[in-house]
Amino acid sequence: MKIVWLTVSMIFVLAFVLVGVAHNAMPASIDAHETADDSSALFAKHCADCHGKDGRAKGFKAKAKGTRNLTDPQWQDRVSDERIFNAINNGKGRMPAFGKKLSETQVNSLVQYVRGLKR
Ligand code: HEC
């Protein structure tokens, strides 16, 4: 009887350890999959605070910082992809640089995302 009890508790301990390992492994695998497809998630995480979720820079913070409205079609027609890339990568005025935080692929996907904001 003692042996059976021991086996049952061992199984429980093992199950908990396995669940714990799987849980810890989750964030790492999400990071690894943060690719171009996640540009809207990247924008929400790194850019929306200043530019607004829809890029219109309407919030209080956006006004205070003089943030650009990324949906402005006249501005969109005027700027090159390269300029948008450089603004994100190197920063501009009061906008911080993201070159060290984001990979080139991620910056490129954000350039495409910004293009998609045009209204
Ligand atoms: C701390 C606030 C802040 C954050 C965060 C921020 N920006 Fe900006 N952004 C600004 C400001 C301010 C400007 C206007 C800079 C200027 O023209 O002097 C700007 C300008 C821009 C421009 C226009 C650059 C140009 O050449 O006209 C683009 C494109 C842009 N941001 C994209 C992004 C993207 C994409 C992110 C996220 C990776 C981001 N921004 C994060 C504040 C921010």
Image (tube, helix red, strand yellow):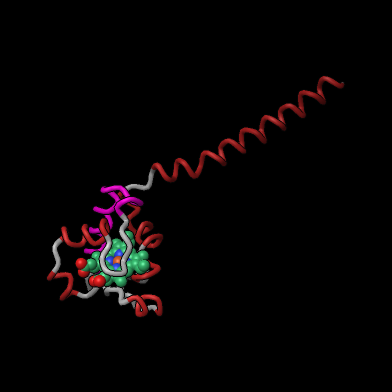
Q: Position of residue 65 (x, y in %)?
A: 34, 75
Residue situated furthest right in the rendering = 1
Majority secondary structure of the magenta segment? helix
Labels in figure, total: 0
Is 4 rendered above or below residue 68?
above
**Rendering quarter of residue 118:** bottom left
Instruction: Say whether residue 73 is left or right of residue 97.
Output: left
Q: Nearer the viewer, residue 12 or 35?
A: 35
Q: Residue at x 23, y 58 (%)?
A: 111
Is 64 rendered above or below residue 84?
below
Instruction: Say whether residue 85 is left or right of residue 37.
Output: left
Q: Position of residue 103 (x, y in %)?
A: 30, 47
Q: Residue at x 40, y 42 (%)?
A: 32
Q: Nearer the viewer, residue 106 or 113?
A: 106
Q: Is residue 65 visible?
A: yes
Magenta segment, which residues?
Answer: 99-117
Quadrant of the snapshot with the N terminus: top right
Residue situated furthest front in the rendering = 93
Tell which quarter ligand 1 is in: bottom left
